[in-house]
Image (cartoon, rainbow, N blue to C red):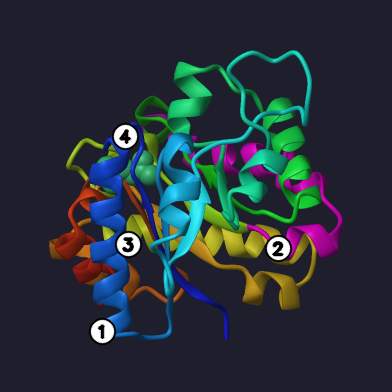
Amino acid sequence: MRKKIVAGNWKMNTTIDEGLQLAREVNRLVDNDPGDVLVIVAPPFSHLSEIKKVLSVVALSAQNCASENRGAFTGEVSAEMIKSTGAEYVIIGHSERRTLFREEDEILLKKVKLALESDLIPIFCCGEKLSEREQGKHFITVQDQLASTLFMLEDKNFRQIIIAYEPVWAIGTGLNATPEQAQEMHEFIRRLIGQHFNTDISDAASILYGGSCKPSNAKELFDNPDVDGGLIGGASLNANDFFAIVKSI
Ligand code: PGA
């Protein structure tokens, strides 16, 4: 059975005190009512080591890492540094990184490799823009994103990865993919993994949905056979909403 996962991407929100409060609350809710879902929070870099101290049943992720490990890269934070905070996961290739910070596939593959070398598990995001969906190019877009990144990895490395399908038009817009749209893309991604690697690997791969996932739509999204959980933005900033999403699996 593959892992069910719900991860909260806090983006550039919360001060350290606010973040600690939110993390404590999420940890308390999960601790009081644990299930078989892996719950992850991804606060800003500046909060990681402090937040690590208040988590016991919730895992910790960064939202990005550098494409180099050390050196003259002012303002960057490497995978090795993230690992040293106690974090275990790192989001790579979020559409905000791809568009606002112009991160291309080549850079993303470097980040994935460095994360794995530092013993961090990448949560790798893919997904099409609205124009690509409108032109019927959503499958080929996602296929290309995976072909030039994750499908360059060796089997044993690919097995570590968590994939998040996040249609860009659904992120922060309030407009989620329909359960049918999510399922058909997740099934497609799993089929590609099966073809490129093998079906043992594709059966074991956790593929999360992200994009305006909230308590009111989480269950219908998660009920699909190929949707193994969610990457949650806005709704992860409220502990009760986030936990309601965790409980929707
Ligand atoms: P959203 O963001 O849930 O606010 O749409 C999801 C994400 O960006 O990971």
Q: Earlier in the sequence, mark 2 or mark 1?
A: 1
Q: Is residue 114 left or right of residue 103?
A: right
User: Which residue type carries mark 2?
Assistant: Gln
Q: Is mark 2 within 8 Å of ligand 1?
A: no
- Callout 2 crowding tier (Cα within 10 Å): few <14, some 14–19, many ≥20: some
- Check if mark 3's residue and mark 1's residue have beta carbons within 8 Å: no
- Check if mark 2's residue and mark 4's residue have beta carbons within 8 Å: no
Q: Earlier in the sequence, mark 2 or mark 3?
A: 2
Residue 187 place in picture, x, y as percent = 52, 64
Tell me which corner region of the image, top left, top right, bottom left or bottom right, holds residue 24: bottom left
Q: Earlier in the sequence, mark 1 or mark 4?
A: 1
Residue that label 3 marks:
180
138 magenta-colored? yes
Image point (71%, 67%), residue name: 194
Image point (47%, 21%), residue name: 99
Considering the numbered disc 4 on the image, is that residue within a helix, a strand or a loop? Answer: helix
Q: Marks 4/3: CA distance? A: 16 Å
